[in-house]
Image (cartoon, helix red, strand yellow):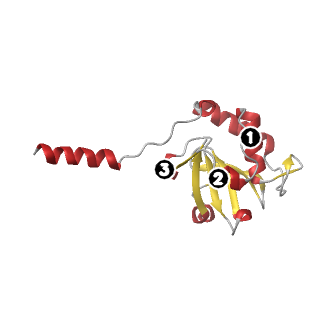
Amino acid sequence: MRMGLLLFVLLLVGCSHHAPPINSRLSDSITVIAQLRDQLGSWRGTPYRYGGMSRGGVDCSGFVYLTFRDRFDLQLPRTTSAQSDIGTRISKDDLLPGDLVFFKTGSGENGLHVGIYDTDNAFIHASTSQGVIRSSLDNVYWRKVFWQARRI
């Protein structure tokens, strides 16, 4: 009986998962949400421009890079491919404001897209067709091309 109970407990513990801890600069969700909303307000409608890093045009990884630099004093890599290697991979179910969300929208390194999780299953990003916007992860397109999420 004891051996069976022990095996049951070990099985439960082994099946559980824990999301990684949050970077201290991203630990206060209310502050993170406010900063993300301010950033979106400042950049909304800025056109997409591959390689861009200004309000004249910005690409997805540039928007992520600038958001983390300007709002959270964190230096991230500049490219989507390099950004997809930092932090810890997490489940989509564990997303918190400030986590990165990645999508495979094409092939190769240029076929990647990145955004920043906000709230209510939405993320902010620089869309190739609409510029800087907020989109839903529940959108059919984004659901289909979702690749991974990472916590910084």
N-term-proximal mark, 2 vs 3: 2
Q: State the residue lying farthest toward the right.
A: 56
Residue at mark 2: 84
Label 2 Cα crowd, 10 Å radius (few <14 / some 14-19 / many 20+): many
Residue at mark 3: 93
User: What secondary structure is marked by label 1?
Assistant: helix
* Tag 3: amino acid: Asp
Q: Residue 125: x, y in percent?
A: 71, 51
Q: Residue 28: x, y in percent?
A: 58, 30
Real-space CA distance between mark 1 and mark 3, rounded to the nearest whole angstrom:
23 Å
Q: Nearer the viewer, mark 2 or mark 3?
A: 2
Choose between 105 and 122: the one closer to the eye.
105
Height in image: 142 above or below 58?
below
Image side of residue 34 versus residue 149, left or right: right
Real-space CA distance between mark 2 and mark 3, rounded to the nearest whole angstrom:
18 Å
User: What secondary structure is marked by label 2?
Assistant: loop
Label 1 Cα crowd, 10 Å radius (few <14 / some 14-19 / many 20+): many
Real-space CA distance between mark 1 and mark 2, rounded to the nearest whole angstrom:
16 Å
Height in image: 13 above or below 139?
above
User: What secondary structure is marked by label 3?
Assistant: helix
Asked if disc 1 and disc 3 are in contact, CB closer than 8 Å, the reply is: no
Q: State the residue lying farthest toward the bottom.
A: 107
Choose between 81 and 25: the one closer to the eye.
81
* Tag 1: amino acid: Thr
N-term-proximal mark, 1 vs 2: 1
Q: Residue at x 83, y 58 (%)?
A: 50
Q: State the residue lying farthest toward the left.
A: 1
Residue at mark 1: 67
* Tag 2: amino acid: Ser
